Amino acid sequence: MKNSWLRSLMFLLTAAISFAPSLHADEFHFAGTIATADQYDLYPLNLAAGTHVVADLICAPDPNNTLDTVLTVFAPGVDPSDVANATYYNDDGGTEVCGGFRSSHLDFFVGADGGDWTFRVDGFGSATGDYTLDIVTTASIVAIPALDTVGLGLLSLLLGGAAMLLLRRQRHA
């Protein structure tokens, strides 16, 4: 009898965990060329609040490529034409070296401002050349979804089963 209660409790726990959302990563890959000192490229992405973002901007591995990468990110509704408005900025934070310059790297969480975030790619000063921009977004594990009626029912069954198991053990002790 004791094992059937434990089996039932394990079944309920497994069922409750199977309803939990899984983490899902999205990957975005862009490639381009900064041909003049005035040029910059924009890449808008719709990001939910709480999203974890890792972005790497790397110049193309070519001995003639002199692009010193600059990666700038703007929150929704912010004008990306001026880096002074940037929410996040990085010039030499990456590990890759190209043309004598370190690549750009950003790692951040989207706060409550979910929406269309804009990633801006440019060269530092008058630097030009080819690049790749890789962005990986992952739903935050900090965001805890609210339980719906099915989830609340399963949680009630799980807690009720645990309470009954404890009461049974107290009677037999």
Image (cartoon, rainbow, N blue to C red):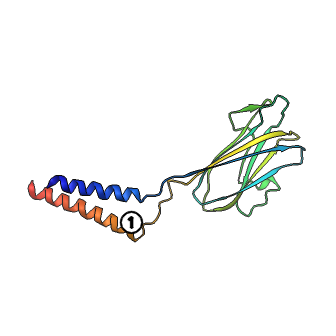
The quadrant of the picture occupied by the N terminus is bottom left
Q: Residue at x 24, y 59 (%)?
A: 162
Q: Report the front residue among 19 and 123.
A: 19
Q: How many numbered tags mark residues here?
A: 1
Q: Is residue 48 above or below residue 123?
A: below
Residue 52: horizontal and vertical position, in percent? Answer: 59, 51
Query: What amino acid type is highlighted by mark number 1?
Result: Gly
Residue 122: horizontal and vertical position, in percent? Answer: 81, 45
Residue 90: horizontal and vertical position, in percent? Answer: 72, 44
Q: Is residue 7 left or right of residue 25?
A: left
Residue 143: horizontal and vertical position, in percent? Answer: 51, 58
Q: Is residue 126 above or below residue 139?
A: above
Q: Is residue 32 left or right of residue 148?
A: right
Which residue position is annotated with label 1?
151
Q: Is residue 12 left or right of residue 36?
A: left
Residue sitting farthest toward the left: 172
Q: Residue 106 falls in which quadrant of the image?
A: top right
